[in-house]
Image (cartoon, rainbow, N blue to C red):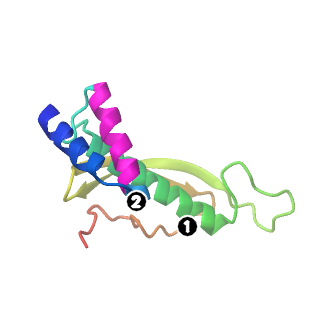
Amino acid sequence: MTATLNSVNQKNEKKSDPSAEEAAAIRLVRMAKEQGRSLTGPDGLLKQFTKNVLETALNEELTEHLGHDKNRAPEDRDSANVHNRTCPKTVLSGATGHVTIDSHRDRDGTFEPQIVKKRQRQIAQS
């Protein structure tokens, strides 16, 4: 594991201007190394990162659907529809295996997520 992290860090140190994605990946790999975390496996960095990205994307989709952030609904809005709750959902990702995410819901049940659709259990590889 350490050899893998060291080789990733050495390759990334040779580049002059990493993209935003590369810079974020470098920070995550370094943090994982400092914490003694594995990149892969049941509690690995890749699985946690996949969970965080999916949950963030679902939250952003719901925010866009409602027109306001959680707990930030304007007083003069036309609808009483708000962020309501999350439900645990296990999805299968080809890269990380089974990942349990918190799927976001709205009070009226009108939100149709796109990144992980209702009843979808497998993340498509594209």
Visible residue check, residue 39: yes
Judged left or right of residue 38, residue 28 is right
Q: Give the range drawn in magenta.
A: 22-35
Q: Point out the tag, 2 or 1, that comes first from the N-terminus.
A: 2
Picture coordinates of residue 112 (x, y %)? 50, 70
Judged left or right of residue 101, residue 14 is left
Residue in the foreground of this view, choosing between 83 and 9: 9
Picture coordinates of residue 87 (x, y %)? 45, 48
**Which amino acid, mark 1?**
Phe
Visible residue check, residue 1: no
Q: Is residue 26 magenta?
A: yes
Give the residue drawn at x 22%, y 43%: 10
Q: Residues within 10 Å of mark 2 (few under 14, many from 20)?
A: few
Give the residue drawn at x 31%, y 26%: 35
Picture coordinates of residue 29 (x, y %)? 30, 40
Q: How crowded is mark 1: few (under 14 residues within 10 Å), some or many (20 or more)?
A: many
Q: Mark 1 points at which residue?
A: 111
In space, the residues marked 2 and 1 are separated at their CA atoms by 33 Å
Query: In which quadrant of the rendered image does the N terminus lie?
Result: top left
Q: Name the residue under label 2.
A: 19
Judged left or right of residue 125, residue 74 is right
Give the residue drawn at x 23%, y 69%: 125
**Which amino acid, mark 2?**
Ser
Cβ–Cβ below 8 Å for labels 2 and 1?
no
